[in-house]
Image (cartoon, rainbow, N blue to C red):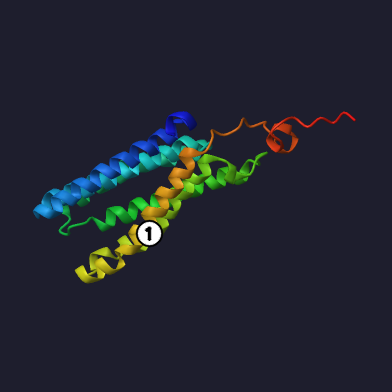
Amino acid sequence: MFSTRNKARDIRVILFYTIYTFANDNLLRLLKGSGNDDAIFIFLSLFTIVEYLLFSYALYLNIRKPLFKKIIIYATPLFLAFSCYQFLNSSSNIDALTITLENLLLIIFCLFYFFDELGEPQATFIYSSYKFWMLVAILVYSTGTFFFFMQSDSLSNEQWAKWSIINYLCTTLKNILFSVAVLMRKDEPKDHDPWNTQESLFEKPFNTAL
């Protein structure tokens, strides 16, 4: 389905992220069964960094304003430095501060995209673009898990098991929205106007001759 629909670079980034997530989740499941907590922490921390890099790159590709692009570029090394510091100094099984910062930055970057769209009127509806669904997936996932991971260090094992449903639901919704983005056609050219195109309304051109 992917090879015959949308081959845009940002969609390929999302596809790679999905494959990486699937492989990482299965690896963590195996490590959890072996009780190797140190390895689990390493792969969880690495996943946070890779997730941020892939999502921020996909957002960077879709943001037009140079100022917003520069903010993403400058924020990335700062995030990486903070992630490394937390990795070396964290005493818990999950680096909640790094994940919280990741979600906060991704939310801001998603808002950059919507500011771009508001400042440049389009001939087509915003939700007719695969980019919209991809950005919404990242935004829903980041906002939905923001407070959960921010409080995760203070949760007991029982509370973690109870409230993990939030993460599962947001992850499922994110994957569904990513699927919508992958299966949609590439965006029409900027000057395309669906209201003035006969083929967009009818299967065959409408014959106005009487």
Label 1 SS: helix
Question: Which residue is rendered at x = 23% and y = 55% of the image?
Answer: 95
Mark 1 is on which residue type? Leu
Q: Nearer the viewer, residue 153 or 68?
A: 153
Question: Which residue is rendered at x = 50% and y = 35% of the image?
Answer: 66
The quadrant in which residue 9 appears is top left
Q: Look at the picture and state if 34 lies above or below 191.
A: below
Instruction: State left or right for residue 208 relative to residue 7.
Output: right
Check the picture and name the quadrant holding the N terminus. top left
The quadrant in which residue 125 appears is top right
Q: Nearer the viewer, residue 23 or 87?
A: 23
Q: Look at the picture and state if 98 lies above or below 3.
A: below
Per the image, the residue denoted by label 1 is 169
Q: Position of residue 85 (x, y in %)?
A: 21, 49
Question: Which residue is rendered at x = 63% and y = 40% of the image?
Answer: 120
Q: Look at the picture and state if 24 lies above or below 148.
A: above
Q: Position of residue 108 (x, y in %)?
A: 45, 50
Number of on-image labels:
1
Q: Nearer the viewer, residue 50 or 177?
A: 177
Question: Which residue is rendered at x = 50% and y = 49% of the image?
Answer: 111
Does the rendering let one see residue 40? yes
Does the rendering let one see residue 36? no
- Dot 1, crowdedness within 10 Å: few (<14), some or many (≥20)? some
Instruction: State left or right for residue 137 relative to residue 165.
Output: right
Q: Nearer the viewer, residue 126 or 116?
A: 126
Instruction: State left or right for residue 74 relative to residue 194.
Output: left
Q: Position of residue 188 (x, y in %)?
A: 60, 32
Check the picture and name the quadrant holding the C terminus. top right
